[in-house]
């Protein structure tokens, strides 16, 4: 005796699946309009405070800030030394040597943040760094005009 195979239509399982997807949440988000919530340990753009770099601050105002370069004849350069991607270069700004960070080379390992003895380089959660001009990704050390030149 030969058993007959039942012929099943492939339309019904596909139709059931399509209908079930109508009532589920989408897997994607509306990113540019709805900002994502980032985890606490996310690594974004570096923040560089030029006034804190190579300065010993005695917490008594701007009159009691002492530049290390005048004391030792050079700046600390710890951030440039410890950067594994060599994204930090020491350049002169107003006669003082300060780090210039190239975010195009940066691997966001935050070694410079951890090794900076003066907390001049800090972390942030800014992750939107897309640009068409690579020169915008170079963080040049500049003194703010409203804060006065040091």
Image: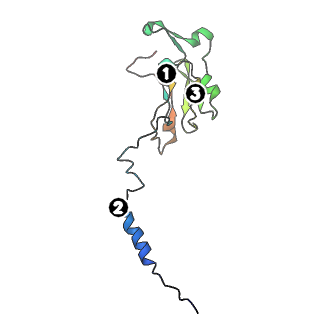
Q: Residues within 10 Å of mark 1 (few under 14, many from 20)?
A: some
Find residue 59 and report its image quarter.
Answer: top left
In the picture of the structure, the residue carrying the numbered disc 1 is 50
Residue identified by numbered label 2:
23
What residue does disc 3 label? Answer: 112
Number of other residues with Cα within 10 Å of mark 2, as a class: few under 14, some 14 to 19, many 20 or more:
few
Q: State the scheme by which the image is colored.
A: rainbow
Of badges 3 and 2, nearer the viewer stands 2
Residue furthest to the front in view is: 1
Relative depth, front residue between 95 and 98: 98
Closer to the N terminus: mark 2 or mark 1? 2
Along the line of sight, which residue is nearer the eye, 26 or 128? 26
CB under 8 Å between callouts 3 and 1?
no
Q: CA distance from mark 2 to mark 1?
A: 53 Å
Q: Nearer the viewer, mark 2 or mark 1?
A: 2
Residue 145 found in image quarter: top left
Q: Residue at x 39, y 48 (%)?
A: 31
Q: Earlier in the sequence, mark 3 or mark 2?
A: 2
On screen, residue 52 versus residue 36, left or right, reads: right
Query: Residue at 53% across / 86% down in the picture?
Result: 5
Q: Nearer the viewer, residue 10 or 83?
A: 10
Query: Where is 91 relative to 68, above or below?
Result: below
Residue at coordinates 47% horizontally, 6% vertically from top-left?
64
Regarding mark 2 in the picture, which secondary structure is present there? loop
């Amino acid at each position: 005796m030969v058993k007959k195979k039942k012929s099943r239509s492939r339309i019904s399982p596909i139709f059931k699946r399509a209908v079930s997807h109508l009532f589920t949440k989408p897997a994607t988000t509306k990113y540019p309009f709805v900002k994502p919530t980032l985890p606490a340990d996310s690594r974004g753009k570096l923040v560089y405070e030029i006034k804190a770099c190579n300065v010993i601050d005695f917490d008594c105002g701007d009159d009691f800030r002492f530049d290390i370069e005048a004391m030792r004849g050079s700046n600390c350069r710890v951030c440039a030394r410890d950067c594994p991607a060599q994204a930090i270069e020491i350049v002169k700004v107003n006669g003082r040597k300060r780090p210039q960070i190239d975010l195009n080379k940066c691997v966001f390992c935050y070694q410079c943040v951890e090794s900076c003895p003066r907390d001049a380089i800090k972390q942030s959660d800014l992750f939107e760094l897309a640009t068409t001009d690579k020169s915008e990704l170079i963080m040049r050390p500049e003194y703010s005009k409203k804060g006065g030149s040091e």
